[in-house]
Image (tube, rainbow, N blue to C red):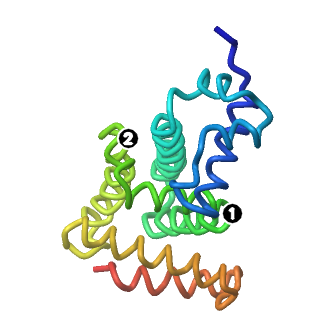
Amino acid sequence: MKQKDELKREAIINETIAIVYDKGFTAVKMARIAKKVDISPSTLYVYFKSKDDLIKTIATDLLKKLTDIGQDQLKSELPYKLKFKAIWIFYINFGINNRKEVSFIHQVKQSPYFEMIPKEIRQLKSTFIFDLLDEGKRQGLIKNLDNTILSVLLEAFMNETVKLIDTKTLELNEEDTNTMFSLAWDAIKN
């Protein structure tokens, strides 16, 4: 069996994300990816058993990475609102700087591929966000509403903020970022 090369693996992943961003999952063809990254199709199968395995692995890795970084911020000793804002800004920046990856995650969530991701990985982000919201509720800072409702509201604010910055309706500056954060904060604060 051939030894795996991390650079080739990354090239395969990046090419797959780019294809999904441009044309969706139906355009992901193993032979096409192999050709684009200059390897044989049989070599591609050394890295990933199938198209499903490739997409599931990418989605799992992205969701885990995104949540791990957010959870590190949750451990900070900042006052709650500042911690919340730091996490908000992290996710806005991630969305702006990783458009293709975010699009990939959104598309996976709307497809049968999402069910292929291990349940504990699918639930990581919810658990992380729910922990953040529960901390705010314990401190009396967040409305005592269902966490699912609060998290959907926050995700919608974040996604729309990224879209407004992408379309140049908002600028990526402190004033506009603070305005959008304040609107989101006002929606959930107690």
Q: Is residue 185 above or below residue 29?
A: below
**Of 161 and 142, the residue lying toward us:** 161
Location of residue 179 (image quadrant): bottom right
In which quadrant of the rendered view does residue 149 lie? Answer: bottom left
SS at mark 2 in the image: loop
Q: Earlier in the sequence, mark 2 or mark 1?
A: 1
Which disc, if any, is residue 97?
A: 1
Vertical comparison of 140 with 83: above or below: below
Q: Position of residue 66 (x, y in %)?
A: 52, 50
Nearer-the-camera pick, 73 or 104: 104
Q: Residue at horizontal 74%, vertical 31%? A: 8
* Badge 2 vs badge 1, beta-carbon distance below 8 Å: no
Disc 2 crowd rating (10 Å Cα; few below 14, some 14-19, many 20+) is: many
Task: Check disc 2 and report the residue beneath it.
Answer: 117
Q: Label 2 amino acid?
A: Ile
Looking at the image, residue 171 lies above or below residue 109: below
Residue 19 is drawn in which quadrant? bottom right
> Could you tell whether 156 is left or right of 10 in the image?
left
Residue ID at (42%, 70%): 155
